[in-house]
Amino acid sequence: MSDLDTVIQTLERYISPLNARSLVQRATRDRPGSVRSAKAMAELVTALQKSIRLFLAEPELSRAARDLEKLCRGPAAPKNEVCRINLLTESDIITARMEARRICDEMGVRSFETQKVTTVVSELARNIISYATCGRMDIVPKPAVRRIAIDAVDEGPGIPHLSKVLSGEYQSRTGLGRGLMGTKRLAAVFDVTTGSSGTRVLAEIAV
């Protein structure tokens, strides 16, 4: 079975076979036949998650999106080792979230704490894509102390008014600062350093 057949079968759990094949054909118009890399699969999943909104409402939409995300899971990294994700496109946010969930599963983290970890990963990864265009994230399991550390680094222009952002005083039309505030609330350890050469956010989530 090809990778695209697997994608189609996943969609067919929620929409008709005709619609499933049509969505995949449109999404793979520029790369027919197969999806040969993890990045290509993540890009396909991102496109399909947007397309299925035309056919599904909650809660089926969320379940379908989660099932599609599972297709992005590549070979598992060795247990309890640092996982690094380079953040360049929207699809890399999905990859980061899936890796965070995998690490939580390996550590036996409960669903509530898993949601906290994946939320922090998503927020920090999206900040990098939205405001710095590129960067990287290390997700570090710390089973001895029941924590997962997230180290997000970018080479963007830095965060102006950082103290006001972290205090909740700074208001931005673009939403700048909301992700940092949410991360700060969820993290047991939280630190931000920023300047003209980039920003680094360190967060540890108790699990």
Image (spheres, helix red, strand yellow):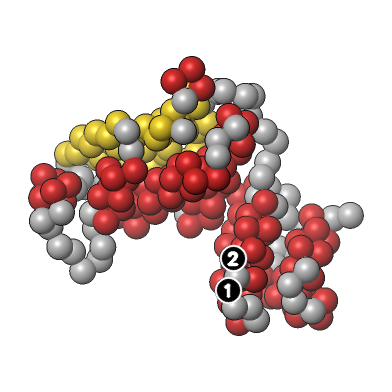
Residue drawn where x is 13% and y is 48% of the image:
167
Residue 63: x %, y % from top left: 64, 63
Task: Tell me the tag on residue 79.
Answer: none
Q: Nearer the viewer, residue 71 or 42?
A: 71
Residue drawn where x is 67% and y is 51% of the image:
70
Q: Mark 2, residues whose alpha carbon is within 10 Å: few (<14), some, or many (≥20)?
A: some
Residue 172 seen anywhere in this rendered image of the structure: yes
Question: For residue 49, what is the image quadrant?
Answer: bottom right
Q: Is residue 161 left or right of residue 57?
A: left
Rendered-image quadrant of the N terminus = bottom right
Residue 99 seen anywhere in this rendered image of the structure: no
Q: Which residue is mark 2?
A: 62
Residue drawn where x is 55% and y is 23% of the image:
81
Amino acid type indicated by mark 1: Glu
Give the structural element (helix, strand or loop) at label 1: loop
Do the residues under discs 1 and 2 have CB atoms within 8 angstroms?
yes
Q: Which residue is mark 1?
A: 58
Residue 105: x %, y % from top left: 61, 36
